[in-house]
């Protein structure tokens, strides 16, 4: 297996340090509002990677945290006049619900910062004791000059480090690049007791401490979106390496590219922030998942109407192939084809893996022998499961109402009209039968009379 390591700047062979399990930490959401479609990209990408790793190495201990201490959460809680727990619980629940629509499985652990204050404080104490951090004015800061490799992940020199961090120049800092491990809270702000007074942790130390608590000092894979390379991951490395006497923190660093909306960056000021919560009411979650897997995870991905339409058509083709295979029992012991697995094990090349999946769909549509059908069905289902696709059965796929269609018919209404049409045909009332067919067509429902009887689907 090969993975692109941001730290090395190239693809490298991958195997876990402990052959019996892979450890992976992915930075999760800050739960102060609903996740947008860009936030869904790392969730889907690393969910897929976890499936591939599990197949190859057996066990994957996958941690995706919930950041529930953050100034944005404080601001939302203050605005609503509720505790930060109310806000965090609400949006963490929404995050799970939204991602479930996209077929994203639960990680092994989903730690919350509020449950790890002792571990965070202990890590800060160790950093101070080792001379890598200092307390000043109620704050504790990491001293970046104390760590010679600072900047290695983001490949920045000191000047660009400063510019990128947009660091606050504060009188209590020894060096402008030093970043906060702990900061004081005012009486009305959420805070926790610590050796430095009542306060709260900085964002970066939260991840370092939770990774250590759940996965140990050196982890195999650390992931997140491209925007996290600097300063977040650069700072996580500095903290963890320095708290662990120089040990490697993450052996492989993986970053997904950004998702843009119709050629533009998603931003509140442009008004083009699309929430997963809203989108799943309009589209089957599987369409969203497929769009996110259509491009290679490291490349930027554009979200627009065409990619959505294209993904729907692709799923029609895949589910159509399954329908073609009918009630055939999948051949026992047959798994995804080698070309498909090789693509995924080559730095999660999902576009190439999808090409292999469509090749199988083509074979399915041509197959006539029962043995071939059984083999192809087993290969198709096993391959699709690795991508988190085709999990619902073709009947379900073809009976989903396109929710965005005004005045559209749900499956029950379609079935009722079809029963009327069947009755009309039995009575040789062809005019009535055609009228119902045309009515359904107007509503976006296509009827196909085939040798196996009649079937229907939404256009
Ligand atoms: P946040 O809650 O802002 O910390 O983001 C959660 C995750 O979503 C991080 O891994 C980010 O890198 C990632 N992310 C945020 N915006 C985008 C985007 N437009 N495209 C891809 N990933 C994103
Ligand atoms: Zn993190």
Image (spheres, rainbow, N blue to C red):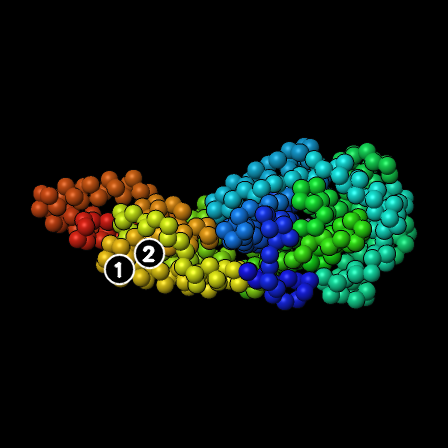
Location of the C terminus (image quadrant): bottom left
Between residues 341 and 395, which one lies in front from this camera angle?
A: 341
Q: Is residue 119 above or below residue 267?
A: above
Residue located at (75% from left, 46% from top): 205
Tell me how many marks there are: 2
Q: Position of residue 150 (x, y in %)?
A: 79, 60
Image: 442 above or below 76: below
Q: Name the image quarter holding residue 231.
A: bottom right
Give how far across and how far down residue 275 sits, in percent.
Answer: 54, 49
Q: Secondary structure at mark 1?
A: loop
User: Residue 240: x, y in percent?
Assistant: 76, 50
Q: Residue at x 19, y 52 (%)?
A: 449
In this picture, residue 205 sits left or right of residue 31? right
Q: Which residue corresponds to mark 1?
A: 367
Image location (x, y in percent) of residue 318:
36, 56
Image quadrant for the N terminus? bottom right
Q: Circle 2 is placed at which residue position?
A: 376
Q: Is residue 68 visible?
A: no
Tell me, yes or no, if residue 50 can be seen here.
Answer: yes
Question: Of marks 1 and 2, which one's residue comes earlier in the chain?
Answer: 1
Which of 257 and 354 lies nearest the eye of the viewer? Answer: 354
Cα distance, mark 1 to mark 2? 9 Å
């Amino acid at each position: 297996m090969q993975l692109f390591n941001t730290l090395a700047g190239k693809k490298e062979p991958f195997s876990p340090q402990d052959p019996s399990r892979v450890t992976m930490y992915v930075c999760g959401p800050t739960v102060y509002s609903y996740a947008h479609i860009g936030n869904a990209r790392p969730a889907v990408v690393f969910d897929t990677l976890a499936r591939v790793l599990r197949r190859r190495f057996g066990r994957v201990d996958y941690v995706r945290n919930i950041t529930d201490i953050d100034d944005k959460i404080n601001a939302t809680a203050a605005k609503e006049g509720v505790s930060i727990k109310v806000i965090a619980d609400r949006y963490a629940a929404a995050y799970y619900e939204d991602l479930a629509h996209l077929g994203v499985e639960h990680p092994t652990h989903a730690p919350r910062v509020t449950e790890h204050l002792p571990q965070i404080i202990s890590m800060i104490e160790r950093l101070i004791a080792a001379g890598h951090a200092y307390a000043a004015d109620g704050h504790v800061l990491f001293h970046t000059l104390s760590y010679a490799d600072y900047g290695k992940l983001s490949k920045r020199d000191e000047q660009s480090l400063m510019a990128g961090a947009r660091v606050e120049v504060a009188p209590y800092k020894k060096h402008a690049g030093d970043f906060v491990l702990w900061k004081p809270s005012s009486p009305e702000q959420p805070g926790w007791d610590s050796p430095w007074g009542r306060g709260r942790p900085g964002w970066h130390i939260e991840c370092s401490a939770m990774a250590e608590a759940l996965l140990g000092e050196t982890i195999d894979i650390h992931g997140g979106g491209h925007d996290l390379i600097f300063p977040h991951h650069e700072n996580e490395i500095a903290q963890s390496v320095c708290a662990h006497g120089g040990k490697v923190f993450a052996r492989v660093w993986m970053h997904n590219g950004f998702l843009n909306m119709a050629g533009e960056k998603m931003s509140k000021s442009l008004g083009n922030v699309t929430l997963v919560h809203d989108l799943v009411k309009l589209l089957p979650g599987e369409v969203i998942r497929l769009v996110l897997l259509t491009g290679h995870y490291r490349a930027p991905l554009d979200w627009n109407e065409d990619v959505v339409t294209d993904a729907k058509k692709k799923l029609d083709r895949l589910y159509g192939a399954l329908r073609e295979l009918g009630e055939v029992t999948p051949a026992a012991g047959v798994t995804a084809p080698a070309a498909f697995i090789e693509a995924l094990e080559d730095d999660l090349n999902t576009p190439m893996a999808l090409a292999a999946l469509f090749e199988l769909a083509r074979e399915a549509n041509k197959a006539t022998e029962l043995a071939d059908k059984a083999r192809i069905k087993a290969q198709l289902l096993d391959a699709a499961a690795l991508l988190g696709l085709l999990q619902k059965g073709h009947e379900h796929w073809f009976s989903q109402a396109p929710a965005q269609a005004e005045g559209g018919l749900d499956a029950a209404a379609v079935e009722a009209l079809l029963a009327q049409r069947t009755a009309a045909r039995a009575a040789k009332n062809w005019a009535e039968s055609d009228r119902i067919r045309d009515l359904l067509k107007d509503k976006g429902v296509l009827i196909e009379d085939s040798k196996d009887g009649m079937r229907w689907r939404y256009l």
